[in-house]
Image (spheres, helix red, strand yellow):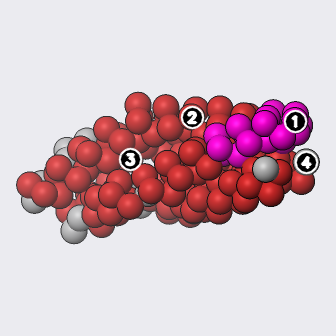
Amino acid sequence: MIDLARMAALVAVLAAAVVYGTDVFCAVVQRPALARVDDRALVAVMGVAVMGNVHRYGDRRMPVPGALGIIAAAVSGALAALSGRWTATAAAATAVGLLLMWLVLYVRVSAPINRRLTTAVNAGDVPPNARVLQSDWDRVITARAVLQGLAIAALCLALLS
């Protein structure tokens, strides 16, 4: 049972790492890069559908590792509890909580913006508020990355406990 709990924690780490890496890239590279371009260039980027298509593919593909990370973390915590490994149980439960907090930020802030940009791309439009949309999206990306990073740290503690 202990080995199964650790295997589930490992799967959760690997799955969460996919999302974490994406969010860190966006926070460290994409956000400051887009902040340095003027509105005309940002709209031109939007006009050629770069960001809209990034969100189109991200929203289709990223739920798989995201859901797998949450499920595997919960399974790890449950199996650790059944094994009487309370430190691992608490660490995995913390990871689940952090991942769920990330999900709330994504669903409430990021996903609606992603849908607006994707809809604009599909219609061949450039949103007149492209800078505002990007700014609103950028507002939560660092928090998203931190939540994923803390969840991975908690899962690593579960692996080591």
What is the spatial separation of the Cα atoms under label 3 and label 1, in whole angstroms?
46 Å
Q: Secondary structure at mark 2?
A: helix
Q: Which residue is mark 4?
A: 161
First in sequence, mark 3 or 4: give its number.
Answer: 3
Kindly state the secondary structure of the residue where label 4 is placed.
Answer: loop
Disc 3 residue type (three-letter):
Gln
For the residues labelled 1 and 4, the Cα–Cα distance comes to 11 Å
Q: Is residue 121 visible?
A: yes
| Predominant secondary structure, magenta span | helix
Frontmost of labels 3 and 1 is 1
Whole-number angstrom distance, CA of label 3 to CA of label 4 = 41 Å
Query: Is any part of residue 144 visible from this angle?
Result: no
Percent of width and height locating residue 121: 17, 58
N-term-proximal mark, 1 vs 2? 1
User: Which residue has dot 2 on it?
Assistant: 100
Q: Identity of the amino acid at label 1?
A: Gly
Q: Earlier in the sequence, mark 2 or mark 3?
A: 2
Q: Which residues are magenta?
A: 73-90
Q: CA distance from mark 4 to mark 2?
A: 22 Å
Which amino acid type is marked by label 2? Leu
Q: Earlier in the sequence, mark 1 or mark 4?
A: 1
The residue under the point 74% across, 55% down is 4
- On the picture, is 137 further left or further right than 159? left
Disc 4 vs disc 2: which is toward the camera? Answer: 4
Q: Residues within 10 Å of mark 4 (few under 14, many from 20)?
A: some
Q: Which disc number belongs to residue 134?
A: 3
Is 73 displayed left or right of 102 in the figure?
Answer: right
Q: Is residue 11 left or right of residue 94?
A: left
User: Viewer-nearest of labels 1 and 2?
Assistant: 1
Q: Residue at x 46, y 39 (%)?
A: 106
Which residue shows up at 64% across the image and 40% down it?
Answer: 74
